[in-house]
Image (tube, grey):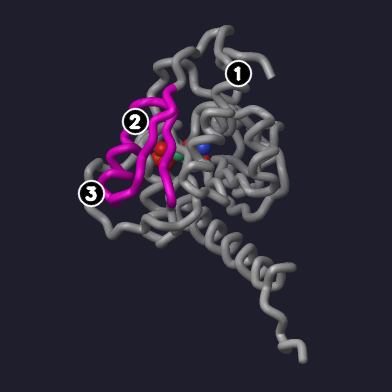
Amino acid sequence: MPGGTVPGEPAPGEPAPGGLAAGRAVASVAGGDVGVLASGTGSILEALIDARVPIAVVLVDRPCRAEDVAAGAGLAAVRVERRSYGPDFGREAYTCEVVATLRRHGVRLVAMAGFGTILGRAMFDAFPGAVLNTHPSLLPEFRGWHAVQAALAAGVAVTGCTVHIATEEVDEGPILAQEEVPVRPGDTVEVLHERIKEVERRLYPRTVLEVLARRAAVDLDGPGAPAATPPR
Ligand code: GRF
């Protein structure tokens, strides 16, 4: 994958989507094995925290409010800063740094929550089938960072959000959950995005918790699991 900003990412300096007020104190959900990746206001992160998703670390690629949200919840927050948005961006090297950081924190499931850097193959090799994403459109419609703008420009009456397993192909991968959101007359990108995020803040935590429960059940049934009937 080439370096630099690609269509699925925000342009350098592009403001993050709007969100809630920073610095809220919430009960800590530290100590789990979910790594949350964020770049923006962190309102999806807040919803994951509120739903008691067990979070090991919050990783951000730039200074952003999500760091304050993590700190307010007593979570480890690590900034793996993206230093270049130009053609010299070393996407693979950056990805390896992200993977190493997540591994250091014992992450087993990754939840992307508005992360503005597209990660390279090393991420999906390190966490096969275990990188989740929430996207503000009904995929496969309106892939990329400007999904809400694209839906408005297309004049659709209904858009929505999608939770899916992320793959190296941006905004592709098996869909786990989707929900429709109406577009209303006079909607701006901000207003519509916030209406979509209200749904994402409910749908994403619920889906992440379901995935965790399924994975725990598989672990219990796996080769290392205790036998149901002890051998004689
Ligand atoms: C969400 O709409 C998510 O789908 C998209 O980025 C937004 C993140 O919102 N990828 P926030 O920064 O958590 O408020």
* Residue 76 magenta-highlighted: yes
- Label 2, label 3: how far apart the Cα atoms are: 15 Å
Instruction: Decide if residue 133 is on the left or right side of residue 18.
Output: right
Q: Which mark is residue 24?
A: 3
- Residue drawn at x 68%, y 67% is 218
Q: CA distance from mark 2 to mark 1?
A: 20 Å
Residue type of the residue flagged with mark 1: Val
Q: What is the quadrant of residue 208 in the picture?
A: bottom right
Q: Is 141 positioned to the left or the right of 137 in the image?
A: right
- Quick one: SS at disc 3? loop
The residue singled out by tag 1 in the image is 6
Seen from this angle, which residue lies furthest right?
A: 232
User: What element does badge 2 sit on?
Assistant: loop
Can residue 132 be found in the magenta stretch?
A: no
User: Which quarter of the figure is the N terminus placed in?
Assistant: top right
CA separation, marks 1 and 3? 33 Å
- Label 2 vs 1, first from the N-terminus: 1
Camera-side residue of 170 and 120: 120
Where is mark 2, residue-wise?
64
User: What stretch of residues is rendered in magenta?
Assistant: 56-81
Q: Say if residue 178 shows up in the picture.
A: yes
Which residue: 50% across, 13% down?
A: 85
Residue 160 in sight here: no
Q: Is residue 86 above or below residue 93?
A: above
